[in-house]
Image (tube, helix red, strand yellow):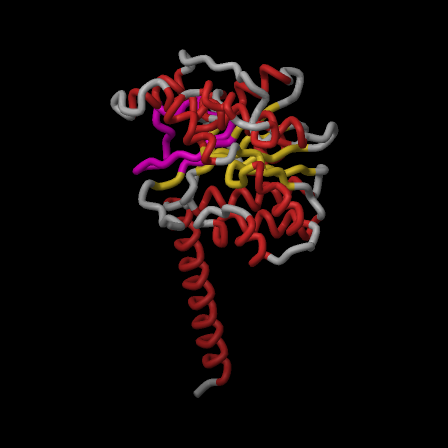
């Protein structure tokens, strides 16, 4: 066999392999782009790059990150956003998932005084804490970042749901210290509260949105209590607590209208390539995930 022909054949074969490999890789990229895990939109329903969002968040004072509690994409992005912003700004973190009477246990863990097992025993951790919130708490611990337990103890929110806001007047001084100062402002005409009653078909009566309001007011109160001027406070909460610039944000703006706020929310759709009309204006940044996304519980 002619050595020169053998060399040419080997070169031609190698070239075909390279071309085939490039085609396979390109096809994989196209498939990935055609079937993304999420698409990010702005309030007007325009697609926005993750990097652009991060750039715009850089000068804010308070960020409310609304999640679906069992959505892995929202939880992953919470950690990604927090990690990246920590490189640019001094942060304070806070979350609906920790109730204010558990603040000492959370702080003790962050300061290394108790183990994570003790934290689980001393605080009422959500069932999805190990998968969804522990990474954020551990990040805060490793970086020395304060983490606020902002929510009202659930037994008092349940009390409001049963007996109204007036029932909180029966609590002692210590119990009231875990709640927003009473009486709280309450506007039953806000769409979010009205929709709660509609979604329940009238069941639960007028006290159901009041229970939501005391949660919103309490989270806003402790966000501002733990906020440090010049820092960025990132708060993690269920999306309904900040959607359409209501809930927590309504209370924040009543007390500190001069601060610069931003909101992120999570929505799901069958087809995420175009944001559905019902989600327009839901938040400054809207994480749109497929409705068949795997859940964490």
Q: Is residue 284 magenta?
A: yes
Residue at the location (47% across, 28% down)?
A: 241
Residue found farthest to the bottom = 1
Q: Which of these two is toward me, 232 or 184?
A: 184
Give the side of residue 58 with respect to residue 37, left or right. right
In x, y percent, where is residue 49? 53, 35
Give the side of residue 47 with respect to residue 87, left or right. left
In x, y percent, where is residue 261? 60, 24
Residue found farthest to the right = 230
Vertical comparison of 111 with 290: above or below: below
Residue at the location (53% across, 27% down)?
A: 171
Q: Which of these two is toward me, 193 or 117?
A: 117
Vertical comparison of 43 with 48: above or below: above
Q: Which of these two is toward me, 296 or 120?
A: 120
Q: Does residue 234 show up? A: yes
Which quarter of the picture shows residue 115? bottom right
Image quarter (top left, top right, bottom left or bottom right) of the N terminus: bottom left
In x, y percent, where is residue 36? 41, 45
Q: What stretch of residues is rendered in magenta?
A: 264-288
Residue at the location (44% across, 47% down)?
A: 72
Q: Does residue 44 show up? A: no
In x, y percent, where is residue 58? 66, 32
Q: Is residue 34 magenta?
A: no
């Amino acid at each position: 066999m002619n050595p020169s022909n053998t060399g040419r054949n080997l070169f031609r074969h190698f070239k075909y392999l390279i071309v085939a490999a490039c085609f396979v890789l390109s096809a994989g990229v196209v498939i990935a782009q055609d079937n993304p895990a999420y698409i990010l939109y702005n309030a007007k329903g325009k697609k926005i790059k993750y990097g652009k969002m991060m750039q715009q968040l850089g000068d804010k004072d308070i960020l409310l990150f609304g999640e679906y509690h069992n959505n892995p994409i929202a939880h992953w992005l919470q950690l990604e956003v927090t990690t990246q912003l920590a490189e640019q700004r001094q942060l304070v973190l806070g979350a609906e998932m920790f109730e204010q009477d558990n603040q000492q246990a959370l702080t003790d863990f962050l300061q290394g005084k108790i183990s994570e097992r003790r934290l689980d025993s001393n605080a009422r951790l959500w069932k999805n804490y190990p998968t969804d919130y522990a990474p954020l708490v551990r990040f805060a611990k490793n970086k020395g970042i304060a983490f606020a337990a902002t929510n009202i103890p659930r037994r008092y929110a349940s009390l409001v749901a049963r007996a109204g806001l007036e029932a909180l007047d029966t609590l002692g001084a210590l119990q009231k210290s875990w709640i927003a100062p009473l009486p709280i402002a309450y506007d039953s005409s806000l769409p979010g509260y009205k929709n709660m009653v509609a979604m329940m078909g009238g069941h639960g009566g007028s006290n159901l949105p009041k229970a939501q309001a005391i949660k919103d007011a309490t989270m806003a109160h402790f966000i501002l209590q733990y906020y440090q001027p010049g820092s960025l406070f990132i708060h993690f909460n269920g999306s309904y607590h900040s959607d359409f610039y209501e809930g927590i944000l309504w209370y924040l703006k009543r007390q500190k209208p001069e601060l610069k706020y931003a909101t992120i929310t999570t929505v799901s759709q069958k087809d995420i390539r175009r944001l559905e009309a019902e989600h327009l204006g839901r938040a400054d940044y809207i994480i749109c995930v497929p409705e068949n996304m795997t859940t964490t519980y």
